[in-house]
Image (cartoon, rainbow, N blue to C red):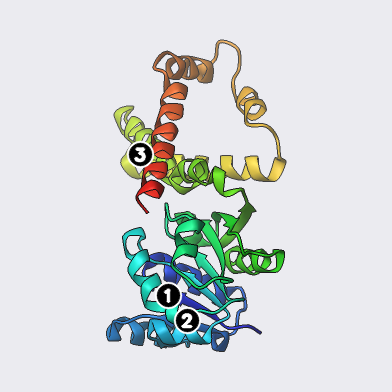
Amino acid sequence: MSLTAIIGAGVMGETLLSGLIRAGRPADTLLVGEKRAERAAELEGRYGVAVVDNLTAATRADTVALVVKPQDMGSVLAEIAPVLRPGQVLVSLAAGITTAFMERHVPAGVAVVRVMPNTPALVDAGMAAISPGSHCSEAHLDEAESLLSATGKVLRVPESQMDAVTAISGSGPAYLFYVVESMIEAGVHLGLPRSTATDLVVQTVVGSGRMLQETGTHPTVLREQVTSPAGTTAAALRELEVHGVRAAFLAAMEAARNRSQALAGDS
């Protein structure tokens, strides 16, 4: 089995590592690039993987996953570029970093894949979108997809759609957590204990998500099934429309898309 290196051992880096281990990937096929000795010892003890410096990881691996902050990408690429070689797969999980930016900083022939993950990957329920660079073959994309599928679902999209993906699934968990917060606060306002309101809202969100996923039914149909004429749900939905909630969501996601485009322009 080919050797995969994960450079960057923060929350998302460890999420990818732990997902691969849970998915049955042997620890001896994984390397982690981490400079902090204490963190390296922690990861070695927890997962049984070899933790090395970034240059060693990039030299030995067939696939290199860069799980670093966008502002650190340039310096990390400058560090590892001298040891990268044609045929390697470089997978970036840094928001706003384009494949063109990465290709300018690595040797010709290195296959680059751009990924937009999201935080539900922490519980193996992530949504990752992947886009190929100019030297990326179907086999390279398959390798990246195999890597990311350890923490959830993977979807291939053209890179031109990546800013929209960032606005929808990348930032999306925050919107849903915001809605959950608001519903819990409403429950407290209506006289429920906070713990009761939390249980009611969280399970409602989880159950609704499962209905969407498992039935394949359009959300409009599912909403209509809950909405009796002149009933309580109809009264609530009317208030949401009056307050422009649908339009606010559109504006919010356009703002996120625009910010993603600006970040990409800065790279």
Closer-to-camera residue (173/89): 89
Q: Residues within 10 Å of mark 3 (few under 14, many from 20)?
A: some
* Closer to the eye: label 1 or 3: 1
Which secondary structure lies at badge 1?
strand
Closer-to-camera residue (223/255): 255
Q: Is residue 264 above or below residue 135?
A: above
Residue type at the position of mark 1: Ile
Q: Which residue is mark 2?
A: 58
Q: Is residue 19 above or below residue 124?
A: below
Whole-percent x and y of residue 98?
A: 47, 55
Q: Which residue is mark 1?
A: 7
Q: Tag 3 or tag 1, which sits nearer the N-term?
A: 1
Residue in the picture at 64% in, 29% down: 222
Which mark, by number, is residue 181?
Answer: 3
Q: Tag 2 or tag 3, which sits nearer the N-term?
A: 2
Q: Is residue 124 above or below residue 82?
A: above
Whole-percent x and y of residue 110?
A: 56, 71
Does the residue at mark 1 contact the one at mark 2 (Cβ under 8 Å)?
Answer: yes
Does the residue at mark 3 contact the one at mark 2 (Cβ under 8 Å)?
Answer: no
